[in-house]
Amino acid sequence: MTSISEQLSDALGIMIMGMGLVFIFLSLLIVGIGIVAKLFPAPVATPTPAPIAPRASAQSTLDPKLVSAITSAIHQYRAK
């Protein structure tokens, strides 16, 4: 049976090796993504102005009967 100090030193070595491997992998991944981004840049879309549609006047789109019904309902509500 090994002593506790030997087990702790083994555990520390395994931990450092694992963290080092993860650090190396992530570093290589970041470098690889940077290289791919430089080799294949994203296309830049130029914004095109939207065509300006003529606006319809608000009076021609509203039904006069609907306006009078809404006005009547508002007056009845405020009267209560």
Image (tube, rainbow, N blue to C red):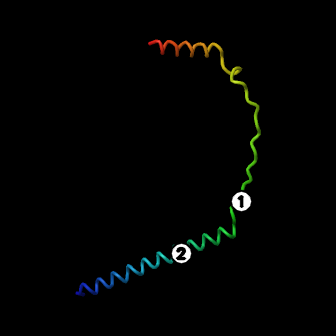
**x and y, in percent, of residue 64 in the image:** 65, 14
Number of on-image labels: 2
* Quadrant location of the C terminus in the rendered image: top left
User: The residue under label 2 is which amino acid type?
Assistant: Ser
Residue behind mark 1: 43
Residue pointed to by mark 2:
27
Circle 2: is it few (<14), some (14-19), or many (20+) Cα within 10 Å?
A: few
Task: Give the CA separation, mark 2 to mark 1.
Answer: 26 Å
Residue at the image point whose x is 76% and y is 37% from the top: 52
Determine whether 46 is above or below 34 in the image: above
The numbered disc on residue 79 is none
Q: Residue at x 66, y 17 (%)?
A: 63
Are the residues flagged by discs 2 and 1 in contact, CB closer than 8 Å?
no
Left or right relative to 43: residue 2: left
| 47 to 69, vertically: above or below | below
Q: Residue at x 73, y 26 (%)?
A: 56
Residue 52, above or below 31:
above
Near mark 1 (Cα within 10 A), the count class, few <14, some 14-19 or many ≥20, is few
Inspect the image, locate mark 1, and give the three-letter code of the amino acid beneath it. Answer: Pro
Q: Nearer the viewer, residue 45 or 49?
A: 49
Q: Nearer the viewer, residue 50 or 3?
A: 50
Q: Position of residue 1 (x, y in %)?
A: 22, 87
Question: What secondary structure is found at the residue carrying circle 2?
Answer: helix
Position in image of residue 69 (x %, y %): 57, 13
Question: Which of the marked residues, 2 or 1, is nearer the chain's N terminus?
Answer: 2
Left or right: 14 as drawn, with respect to 64: left
Q: Quadrant of residue 32?
A: bottom right
Please name the residue shown 69% across and 70% down the image: 39
